[in-house]
């Protein structure tokens, strides 16, 4: 959650910069600094998340969603298939060294080329994976014609930040202690996912209606 706060503060500062080229220079410069700044006080999580925040901001700032709408269907299909293919290949070669929890981000005291490779790899697969997820949601939304289901998707989607925050708390203090003795099972994991998502959505909705908690956990808006 601290990483979310630091990313939000960094993007707020960058958003106030008047020139687009300077925004890019500052963002790239900050990412470059990540390699030579020690991973103290869990800064590695901030370093890991910031490029995704930056891409999201640039995507909205450049009005990319409207530009994508103007593309022809064949180009959209080819682009989507390419993204899914890239993600699938990168996922196959994803190993423990790619986790920010195990290798951090800084190159200090490490094999610099390998560390930079791991950092860039996890940033790219994260951004490509996010794009694939967005495409999948858009496809599902087009296929689902039942309005209540569409409303439910929109309801959950608008509360994604709150769901992420409450999910961290539930996983750390409730789910892991309760299920640490469970044998890995796909169906159990799917069931847990649905239940935890429902609980987190409900908690986020409740937090939205309690002004002090909403301000502290979700911001003023």
Image (tube, rainbow, N blue to C red):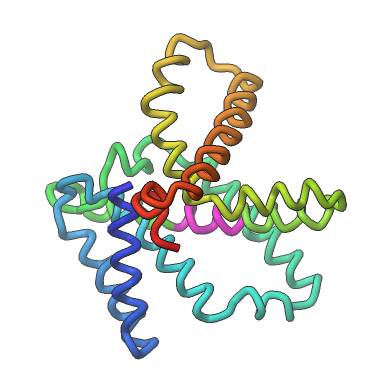
For the residue pair 50 and 84, the one nearer the viewer reads as 50
Q: Position of residue 154 (x, y in %)?
A: 67, 54
Identify the residue at image location x=57%, y=48%.
89
Extreme-right residue of the structure: 145
Horizontally, residue 39 falls left or right of residue 207, namely: left
Is residue 198 within the magenta segment? no
Question: Which of the pair 170/30 is nearer the observer?
Answer: 170
Q: Residue shown at 83%/52% (left/top)?
A: 147
Location of residue 198 with respect to 186 vertically, above or below: below
Task: In this rendered view, identify the residue nearer to me: 65 or 115.
Answer: 65
Query: Where's residue 128, x and y in %?
Result: 54, 57
Main SS of residues in magenta? helix
Q: Which residues are magenta?
A: 124-132
Q: How many marks?
A: 0
Quadrant including the C terminus: bottom left
Judge whether 176 appears above or below 67 on screen. above
């Amino acid at each position: 959650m601290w990483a979310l706060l630091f990313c939000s503060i960094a993007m707020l500062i960058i958003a106030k910069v008047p020139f687009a080229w300077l925004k890019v220079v500052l963002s790239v410069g900050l990412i470059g600094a990540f390699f030579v700044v020690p991973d103290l006080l869990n800064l590695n999580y901030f370093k890991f998340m910031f490029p995704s925040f930056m891409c999201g901001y640039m995507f909205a700032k450049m009005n990319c969603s409207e530009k994508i709408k103007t593309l022809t269907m064949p180009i959209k299909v080819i682009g989507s298939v390419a993204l899914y293919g890239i993600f699938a290949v990168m996922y196959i070669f994803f190993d423990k060294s790619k986790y920010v929890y195990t290798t951090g981000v800084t190159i200090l005291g490490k094999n610099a080329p390998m560390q930079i490779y791991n950092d860039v790899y996890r940033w790219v697969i994260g951004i490509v994976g996010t794009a694939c997820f967005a495409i999948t949601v858009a496809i599902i939304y087009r296929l689902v014609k039942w309005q209540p289901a569409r409303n439910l998707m929109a309801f959950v989607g608008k509360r994604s930040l709150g769901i992420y925050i409450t999910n961290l708390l539930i996983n750390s203090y409730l789910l892991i202690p309760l299920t640490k003795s469970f044998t890995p099972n796909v169906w159990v994991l799917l069931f847990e996912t649905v239940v935890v998502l429902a609980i987190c959505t409900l908690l986020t909705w409740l937090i939205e209606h309690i002004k002090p908690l909403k301000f502290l956990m979700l911001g003023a808006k």
